[in-house]
Image (spheres, grey):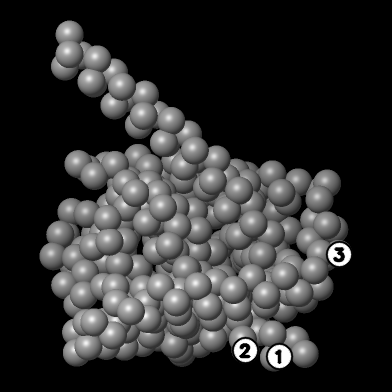
Amino acid sequence: MTSIILLILKASIILSVFAIGLKSTFEDTTYLFRRPAQLVRAVVSMNVVMPLLALILGLAFDLNPALKISLLAISVSPVPPIFPNKAFKAGGTETYTIGLLVAAALISVILIPIVMEIIKRSSSAPLSMQPSGVFVTVLTTVLLPLLVGISVRTLFPTFAERIAKPLAIVSLVLLVVCALPVLIGMSKAMFALVGDGTLVILSLFACIGLAVGHFLGGGRQAGNRHTLALATATRHPAVALTIGHANFPQQRLPLVMMYLILAGIWGGIYLAWARRHEAAHAAETNHAVKA
């Protein structure tokens, strides 16, 4: 039953990315590669600052090895396949969001082995991973379904426009139906993390990620700042699990899932604050113009 649930869960994620591709273009996928300054800020935010933060937290608080490995795995993973939906709600432009999704996926395949090797040599963390596993996960859950969706839109734009929304709804329903049994099954293991400081560390990691992404995501489009903040704090669970699999297989899933839940909660709080701040700023600007 668990295997069936996870298979349907993966199918729902692939379907979600395919639906996003049906509303995107090939030009969107190369957006950040054509804007080196924005690409560098995104890489620094996601792939430089966060791994360093994971190391610092591990050393400063003498974290247990399972938590240390989980933070490191999360810090070098790309953004999750369902990330664009959250980014659009945050006001991020379609071109920047899709460009960030693709850039993070491609760069992760190159950077993850390098960053993990650096971390392995500079710390006592027993790191181990298979680059092929990361590549297959990123390819099957992000790059292929996105490119297929874009290709369908290019060849059959009317058909793509008609089926994009229904497919997105179906993928969301499948995601909820499959995720609930998984979360219920892991509830005991996740509740065991309460009270030992794990939630504090995971929350701190997510909040700093939001702050770093917000700071480095500056530009004319405020929504893109929010997009990078969410991307820095929220990562691809399957990639994080792939990295952590060889080290602590009995603990990796509850820790990663708990982080995703906390990152979602803090991300929601951040977006609520950002929207209030923007509304207040817009009101002040309008008042100044009228004056």
Classed neighbour count for the residue bearing mark 1: other residues with Cα under 10 Å, few (<14), some (14–19), many (≥20)? few
The answer to whether 66 appears left or right of 175 in the picture is right
Q: Name the kind of residue labelled 2 in the image.
A: Leu
The reply to whether dot 3 and dot 1 touch (C-beta < 8 Å) is: no
Q: Residue at x 69, y 85 (%)?
A: 5
Q: Measured from the top left, where is residue 218 in percent x and y? A: 27, 42
The reply to whether dot 2 and dot 1 touch (C-beta < 8 Å) is: yes
Q: Can you name the residue that lies furthest to the left here?
A: 34
Q: Measured from the top left, where is residue 232 in percent x and y? A: 43, 55
Q: CA distance from mark 3 to mark 1?
A: 20 Å
Residue 103 in sight: no
Residue matched to label 2: 7
Q: CA distance from mark 3 to mark 2?
A: 23 Å
Classed neighbour count for the residue bearing mark 2: other residues with Cα under 10 Å, few (<14), some (14–19), many (≥20)? few
Closest to the camera, between mark 3 and mark 2, is: 2
Front residue of 113/164: it is: 164
Secondary structure at badge 1 equals: helix
Q: Measured from the top left, where is residue 113 in percent x and y? A: 43, 77
Position of the C terminus, as image quadrant, is top left
The answer to whether 17 appears left or right of 221 in the picture is right
Residue matched to label 3: 188
Secondary structure at badge 3 equals: helix
* Mark 3 or mark 2, earlier in chain: 2
Q: Residue at x 50, y 64 (%)?
A: 235
* Mark 3 or mark 1, earlier in chain: 1
Specify the label residue 3 is tagged with: 1
Q: Can you name the residue that lies furthest to the top here?
A: 291
Give the quadrant of residue 42: bottom left
Q: Looking at the picture, does residue 284 appear above or below residue 109? A: above
Position of the N terminus, as image quadrant, is bottom right
